Image: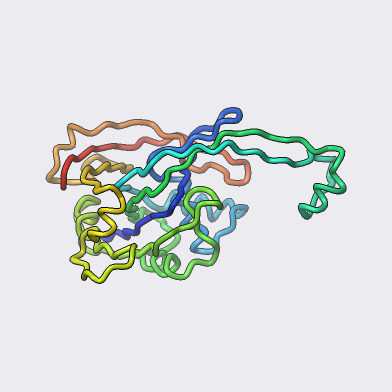
Amino acid sequence: MDILVFRLYGPMASWGEIAVGESRHTASYPSKSAIIGLLGAALGIARNEEEKQQQLQQGYALAVELLTAGHLLRDYHTTQVPDSVGKFTYRTRRDELILGKERLGTILSSREYRTDALALVAVRVLVDAPFTLAEIQAALLQPKYHLYLGRKSCPLAAPLQPQLITDQLNYYDAFKAYQHKPMLPTSIASNGTLAKRDYDWLGRPNDRHYYWEGQPEDFSDTLDLTLRQTRTRHDQPLSRKRWQFMPRQEHYLFCSGDA
């Protein structure tokens, strides 16, 4: 089985959870909607191309290795915009402030972010996948649209370093075969594991958290998978135009130390 593995790191990331009212929470690890959105942006698929978006989210299975969840950051956020006026469209911020001056209102919200979080994402193809893993790898190296970590205010801070890992039996083996490249400048040659300077910068993370969809045995044939949890997460895109998501089943396994 061929698996494409790439990393996600930035000073801030926001992996949206169910939002009610003014609170905008984040999960500790990447959501499927965020990963599929990132792949779609790299491939040049616009958000309003519903059919292509659906093909993308139905054509691939995902797994995540969370090396560190970073730290939680909460931001008190204010947005001032005018309400809608029939079919009239405000085309610029100037239009909003001048033409919509009498209709301006302020929206208050509390938004959460994860700072200095690092994760690996594994992608494998399913039946009728619209792109090969090699095509996705090429797109991640030269993306068509800007890539970000959940929100546009959360850009990448290190190259994705996508690696096509061939002839692997499962996700776990693919994660272990991934060759880490240094994120911070260093004169020490990399041996394929997390660089020492990166390791120290990230707080010396040793524990690993794994999340994957599909069958339990898709993850590993050596670890004790009876220790896993299976839970429901509402992060499978149904319509990006209407901002709707469906529930999906996801497995979780915690491994302490270097496992």
Q: Is residue 191 left or right of residue 26?
A: left
Say if 93 sits above or below 254 in the image: below
Instruction: Tell me if residue 7 can be seen.
Output: yes
Q: Residue furthest top?
A: 21
* 12 or 136, nearer to the observer: 12
- Relative horizontal placement of residue 160, taking residue 91 as reference (left or right): left
Q: Position of residue 130 (x, y in %)?
A: 45, 60
Percent from the top left, x then y, of residue 69?
A: 35, 43
Residue at 45 percent across and 58 percent down: it is 156
* Residue under the image location 83 percent in, 37 percent down: 103
What colour scheme does the image use? rainbow
Q: What residue is shown at x 43% (from left), y 59% (from top)?
A: 157
The image quarter in which residue 233 lies: top left
Q: Is residue 180 left or right of residue 90?
A: left
- Position of 233 relative to 45 (above/below): above
Which residue lies at the image location 80% right of the left edge and 47% below the top edge?
96
Q: Where is 231 relative to 114, above or below?
A: above
Could you say where residue 192 lies in the image, as x and y percent from the top left?
21, 64
Report which quarter residue 78 is drawn in.
top right
- Quadrant for the N terminus in the image: bottom left
Residue 55, can we see it?
no
Q: How many marks?
A: 0
